[in-house]
Amino acid sequence: MSPTRKARRAPRPPRSKVARFRMPSQRSAVAPTVERILRFVARAELSPERRDDLAVALAEALSNAAVHGHKERPRSLVLVAVKASRGCVVVDVRDSGPGFDVDTVVKVDPTDQHHLLVPGGRGVFLMRRLVDRLEFNPKGNHVRLVLESDPQRRRGD
């Protein structure tokens, strides 16, 4: 009789970790929240350039939620969920404000000579260029930023 062998399992891919944060709707809370998120996503092993892209896009998303969504009311909290795995970061930023017309803002190119003096839309424009995917809910008060470590996989330009 031969000894019983146990089947070998294939190694599992690293699991994504999820963190949830609440940020007071104040400009002064944005930088510390960005730093906290960047510490959490270290496991994604982003290059310094991709980490910087994420930091700027996060600052824009958090600022938009606090300033435009909540009108800087500190008791109104911006909700953040961060999912990080090796090579990929997904960040959801949500406020309870009225939102905005996503279609109108996304279509505007603030670098176009006809829009240079028009206020608004620059943060969304910038985020679109810094992350691989930028998604909004229909109401415009929830944004998802997706960033992958491999810049060759970038989409959106």
Image (cartoon, grey):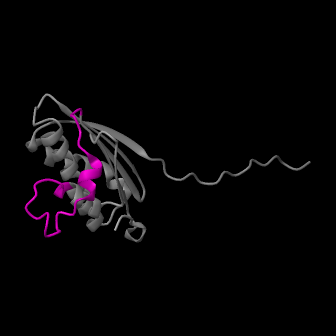
- Main SS of residues in magenta: loop
**Residue 64 picture location, percent across and down:** 17, 46
Is 14 on the left or on the right of 103, as rendered? right
**Residue 135 picture location, percent across and down:** 35, 50
Residue 2 shows in the view:
yes
Residue depicted at 22% across the width and 34% down the height: 98
In this rendering, the answer to whether 13 lies above or below 26 is below
**Residue 101 picture location, percent across and down:** 25, 45
Is 97 on the left or on the right of 19, as rendered? left
Q: Splitting the image into 4 quarters, where does residue 141 fall?
A: top left
Please provide the residue range marked out in magenta. Answer: 96-123
Quadrant holding the C terminus: bottom left
In the image, residue 55 lies in the stretch drawn in magenta: no
Is 11 on the left or on the right of 131, as rendered? right
In this rendering, the answer to whether 22 lies above or below 46 is above
Residue depicted at 17% across the width and 63% down the height: 110
In this rendering, the answer to whether 61 lies above or below 117 is above
**Residue 71 picture location, percent across and down:** 11, 36
Residue depicted at 37% across the width and 53% down the height: 89
Specify the farthest residue to the front.
Answer: 114
Residue 39 shows in the view:
no
Q: Splitting the image into 4 quarters, where does residue 18 fall?
A: top left
Residue depicted at 10% across the width and 55% down the height: 119
Q: How many marks?
A: 0
